[in-house]
Amino acid sequence: MSSSTLPRLRRARRGGFTLVELLIATVAGFIVALSVIALSRDATKTFQEEVRASQAETALRLASERLRADIQRAGYMGSANTFTDPYIERGNQATGTFYSGTHPGIEKMLGIYLVNGGSVDVTYTNGSDVASYSGFNQLNPDTLTLSGNLTTSDQYLGNYMAGQGSCGGPRFQFSNDDPAVARLLQQGVVDAFRPARDAAGTPVGTFMARIYDPSRNRYSIAPVCATSAAGVTPGWIDIAGDPFPAVQPGITLTSWVANPVQTVRWRIRRPPNDVNMDPPRFANGRFELVREWLDATIDPTSKNLSVGMPEVVAEYAVDLKIAFSGETDISTHATASNDFDKAAGNELWTSPAARIVAIPAGVAPQRIRSVRFRLATRASLPDRDLNIAPVFGTGANASNYIYRYCFDATCTTNLARVRTFVGEVALVNQAKVF
């Protein structure tokens, strides 16, 4: 082999891939990359769907505990029914309170007030939207109004100072010797007795207090018109009107007891301006569970009235149903239980008429022994292809659980997974009222 041939052989051995080899390698790599991308896309989609389902379940659990806590306090340190409560201070009135006609929130106060399907009432803002989507999902979410001491677990000793308040009525001045008052002053009197806030965080609303006269075993639910500022000691609340007319102005009576009383309403609503929150084709079906304050000036049977900023307890909530069990006869203590589909039976326990007349025979609102609730939330976006229709009622195949939520009336596409919780709360604090 000549010396001139060797360099050419070395250069040939050092040469790269041919064009055909590069094309084959590129195509093979492209196929592998496509497979990896497809697997990654499916894994990402599955992961995102599971995250949304997990978020719906977490929101459901937190909302259930929040609702349970409020139901447990129905009538707590308040009154199950101010119209028939035998311990309410009435003066010469046979029924009602001194605030009947002036403060509907006191006059018509019930520990529990239910409106079957109230969340789909078109009187509420966006109620027609809730009704539309609930209709083809076979849902009919309720509204539930609860009254009691919802901010503390204490009652406070103090002095009843007739006619010495800043609103022309009495002042209740808290005793610094009471450990409960020490906790109250640390928390803040205004936080306990005026819990609602506006958008700027300022306390709003005329909330209530229960003022108890231990010498006569009588109490009055009265509106709070003013509270002491933070750091002021002794702390105080001022009452509008005259809850105990027999006590002459200028008289101070010691060792009386006071505690706050509030009213809240739970309902499903469409959030304001929700078109900016979700993709346009799903925005109108976005609803949330809210808890809103009512005060002494608001009739609890009214629509679209509340004070302060509503608290959003759960986003993407789709259902809230309430059912009761209680005594049908206060003499024999016979009991009855209603399921969620027994709308008329459940409403009778807490209807406005039941404040005055025992309906059905022997039953009054305070005879409710337990409250059942069904709460459901959905995934934020569609993630289900199969339409598993809900089956309600009490038959052999009935179910209280909802498995999907439809974004359109056909219920064939755009379905979201739903998580449902059913719970029951025993009203221990009302076991011996009246």
Image: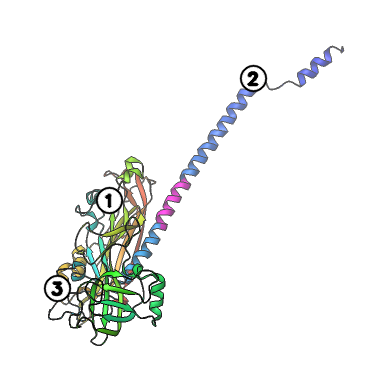
Tell me where residue 338 sits by quadrant: bottom left
In the rendered structure, find residue 137 and report the number of the disc placed on it.
1
Q: Which residues are magenta?
A: 46-58
Amino acid type of the residue tagged 2 in the rendering:
Leu
140 is higher (above) or lower (below) than 371? above
421 is higher (above) or lower (below) than 210? above
Amino acid type of the residue tagged 1 in the rendering:
Asn
In the rendered structure, find residue 166 and report the number of the disc placed on it.
none
Look at the numbered disc 2 and give the secondary structure of its residue.
helix
Q: Residue furthest bottom?
A: 215
Mark 2 vs mark 3, CA separation in Å: 95 Å
Say which residue label 3 marks: 356
Residue contact between numbered discs 3 and 1, judged by CB atoms under 8 Å: no
On the image, the x and y values in percent for residue 227 come to: 31, 70
On the image, the x and y values in percent for residue 218 come to: 23, 83
Prevalent SS, magenta region: helix
Tell me where residue 155 sits by quadrant: bottom left
Look at the numbered disc 3 and give the secondary structure of its residue.
loop
Q: How many marks?
A: 3
Sequence order check: which comes first, mark 2 or mark 1? 2
Say which residue label 2 marks: 19
On the image, the x and y values in percent for residue 269 come to: 28, 53
> Visible in this render: residue 394?
no
On the image, the x and y values in percent for residue 257 come to: 30, 81
Amino acid type of the residue tagged 3 in the rendering:
Ile
Mark 3 vs mark 1, CA separation in Å: 36 Å
